[in-house]
Image (spheres, rainbow, N blue to C red):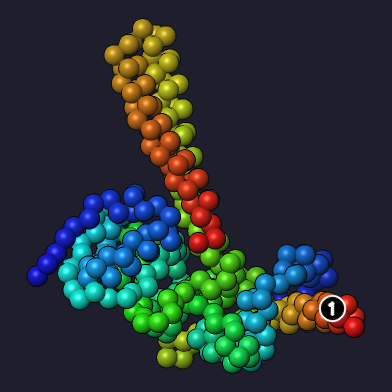
Amino acid sequence: MNKKTVWFPAFRKVVPADFEEWLEGLAREGWNVDKLGSFGAFRIKLKGSEPRMYRYVFDLNVYPKNEYRQTYEQFGWEYVGRMSSCFVWRKEYTDIRPESFTDRESLIQRNKRMKNAYTVIFILMLATSVALLAGGTVLFVSRQSGMAIALILAAVFFSGIDLYLHWVIQKINKNLTR
Amino acid sequence: MKKIIVADMDKLVKRFIPMSETMFYILSSLTEERHGYGIMLHVQELTHGRVVLGAGTIYQTLSKLEQDDLIIPTNEIDRKKNYIISDIGRKLLTCEAERICELSLVAKELLK
């Protein structure tokens, strides 16, 4: 059986609509998600099959109610899996690509939930960078240069992650209506 | 049932009116007890297929309406949760219907 693994998919396709289109493109080529678990953002296993026309939906829901899954299933969506709080659904179609978010407002809200999640991580990372930089500076002034350099390097590392997160937030912001 | 305070109603009017088409149709559908999928079918019929609400939109809107006490969950049959409009929801829907009627009159005048 044909199988392949894709690493860091959610980090490459950060806009929900891009992630969906990427999965749909793979499905048309005959590659479908075999299993999607908590580590799906880091690694996705794909299984070779007949080419299929699937509509994938990516939906972040941190506190889903009981009726969340029921609603999707009643509308004919197949549960693919959950990457932490990000649910992935799919529906096979032949003619018109089905939608889960059918008005502009709910689509923007879906994307804003992703943006807000990244913004929280961005703020935490920024606070960590500032704290490490401050600690490094204090140690440098106290002439403990070895430890100071370690802290400053850690601050640079977290700042790098923050720069990436800033890029992600900007990209989602530009695609709020998709 | 929550008592409607005038100040609260004013806040709700400012927040929800003008209403999105989705919200208007969902609230209208819930003048009778319905579940999410039933709402979609009703709206589709009401608009002759022009408005077809999706699962994500329905779930999101129902959650928001329930959180703001504009609709009330009634029961759950066969894993389908039913809702009905609340008194506050009905008042808000009436406000929006009056606004739309006013707009409609002005629009008709323009077309004369």
Location of residue B94 in the rendering, given as x and y in whole percent from the top left corner: 78, 82
Where residue A151 sits: x, y (%)? 35, 22
| Image quadrant assignment for residue A79 | bottom left
Vertical comparison of A150 with A71: above or below? above
User: How many neighbours does mark 1 have within 10 angstroms: few (below 14), some (14-19), or many (20 or more)?
Assistant: few
Q: Is residue A123 left or right of residue B101?
A: left
Nearer to me, B32 or B75? B32
In the image: residue A131, left or right of residue A173: left
A94, A136: nearer the viewer = A94
Give me the chain letter of mark 1.
B
Question: Which residue is found at the position 34% from the left and 30% from the top?
Answer: A157
- Residue sitting farthest toward the front: B112
Left/right of residue B110 with respect to residue A98 in the rendered view:
right
- Which amino acid type is marked by label 1? Ala
- Look at 50% across and 45% down and name the residue there: A170
The residue at which mark 1 appears reads as B107
Label 1's element? helix
Where residue A118 appears, as percent x and y from the top left, is 45, 48
At 42% from the left and 23% from the top, the residue drawn is A133
